[in-house]
Image (cartoon, rainbow, N blue to C red):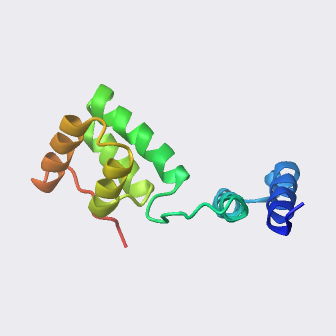
């Protein structure tokens, strides 16, 4: 078996049995590392601009924008997930611009002062 495949499987197996010992941030980092090992083993190049984790976060935020229509809550979720204007643009491109009209309305509202997406430092 290829050494890259063995390394990816070993890391995934370890993480499967020991995930409780990690904080959320550590677990997220380890999951990204394991996914990277899997992609390397499969010889798949990765565009690091958007992660699967961010796609999941964005999916939830899109539902808040599109169905609940609560821009304030969506902005709060964006800030907590560290998703600013540039990341929203990248996520929209990555996700095929789903909820395009709703997201554009949310962005317009946030830029006009209705909600603030600027990340607190």
Q: Nearer the viewer, residue 73 or 3?
A: 3
Q: Position of residue 66 (x, y in %)?
A: 29, 31
Q: Position of residue 19 (x, y in %)?
A: 80, 53
Quick one: which residue is furthest to the bottom in this view? 121
Identify which residue is drawn at 38% across, 50% down. 94
Residue 34, above or below 95:
below
How many numbered discs sit on the rendered protein?
0
Q: Is residue 99 left or right of residue 12?
A: left
Identify which residue is drawn at 54% across, 51% down. 53
Q: Nearer the viewer, residue 59 or 116?
A: 59
Q: Is residue 99 left or right of residue 56?
A: left
Quick one: which residue is furthest to the left in this view? 112
- Classify residue 118 by image quadrant: bottom left
Q: Nearer the viewer, residue 72 or 66?
A: 66
Q: Is residue 59 left or right of residue 119?
A: right
Identify which residue is drawn at 18% across, 51% down. 110
Q: Position of residue 50 (x, y in %)?
A: 45, 58
- Classify residue 14 by image quadrant: bottom right
Identify which residue is drawn at 56% across, 64% down. 45
Q: Position of residue 121 (x, y in %)?
A: 37, 73
Rendered-image quadrant of the N terminus: bottom right
């Amino acid at each position: 078996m290829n050494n890259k495949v063995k390394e990816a499987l070993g890391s995934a197996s370890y993480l499967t049995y020991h995930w409780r010992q990690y904080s959320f941030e550590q677990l997220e980092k380890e999951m990204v590392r394991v996914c990277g090992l899997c992609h390397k083993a499969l010889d798949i190049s990765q565009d690091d601009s958007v992660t699967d984790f961010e796609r999941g976060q964005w999916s939830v935020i899109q539902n808040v924008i599109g169905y609940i229509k609560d821009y304030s809550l969506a902005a709060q979720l964006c800030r907590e997930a560290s998703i600013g204007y540039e990341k929203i643009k990248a996520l929209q491109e990555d996700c095929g611009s789903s909820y395009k009209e709703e997201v554009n309305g949310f962005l317009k509202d946030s830029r006009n002062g209705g909600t603030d997406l600027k990340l607190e430092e």
